[in-house]
Amino acid sequence: MPKPQQRDDKDGRILQVVEPAAVALAQTIKVLEVGSFLISLNADTTMISVYAISKDVYLHWATSDTDFATENNFDEIIPAGQRVLITVPVDDDGRMFTRVHLAGREAGATIVVVEK
């Protein structure tokens, strides 16, 4: 059983993050070369599991298709060889983000993203 992660939501309430016991809504496997890779999330996605297989990966919750992840513009960094479970956040209008951009810290980073 995964150990719960503790986070605060935008109103300061503590959230317990546990991976849902559900089948994946979508999976993405990608080798990141140069630039940022966009994933448009399934409408029912509430959580993503991100694996950085070979190199560190920057993750940025995007407000548009051109709101890229870079070394200067990211919300999370997933270290190489790690898996991170992330709750999809809400934007300033209270809507869940529907896009996420990922970029390798170096070319050749491999990611696996599972939407739940």
Image: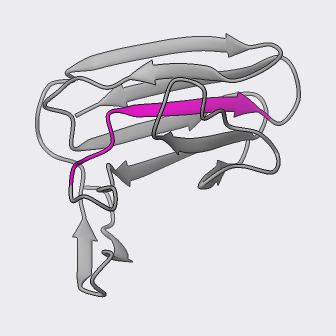
In the rendered image of this protein, does residue 30 appear above or below residue 1?
above
Count of number-bearing discs: 0
Whether residue 94 is visible here, answered yes or no, is: yes
| Residue 93 relative to residue 57: left or right | left
Report the front residue among 49 and 102: 102
| Residue 21 relative to residue 110: left or right | left
Q: Magenta residues: mostly which secondary structure?
A: strand
Percent from the top left, x then y, of residue 88? 32, 49
In the rendered image of this protein, does residue 60 appear above or below residue 40?
below
**Quarter that holds the C terminus:** top left
User: Please, which colouring scheme is shown?
Assistant: one colour
Occupied quadrant, residue 21: top left
| Residue 27 relative to residue 107: left or right | left
In the rendered image of this protein, does residue 84 appear above or below residue 11?
above
In the rendered image of this protein, does residue 64 appear above or below residue 59?
above
In the image, residue 87 lies in the stretch drawn in magenta: no
Specify the segment rendered in magenta.
95-104
Percent from the top left, x then y, of residue 24? 21, 23
Q: Residue furthest right?
A: 106
In the image, residue 100 lies in the stretch drawn in magenta: yes
Percent from the top left, x then y, of residue 65? 52, 23
Percent from the top left, x then y, of residue 60? 57, 44
Report the front residue among 92 and 109: 92
Report the front residue among 32 and 43: 43
- Please report the residue visible at 24 percent of the width from the left and 49 percent of the height from the top: 19
- Please report the residue visible at 30 percent of the width from the left and 75 percent of the height from the top: 9
**Quarter that holds the N terminus:** bottom left
- Please report the residue visible at 41 percent of the width from the left and 31 percent of the height from the top: 99
Report the front residue among 32 and 83: 32
Occupied quadrant, residue 97: top left
Whether residue 81 is visible here, answered yes or no, is: no
- Please report the residue visible at 24 percent of the width from the left and 72 percent of the height from the top: 16
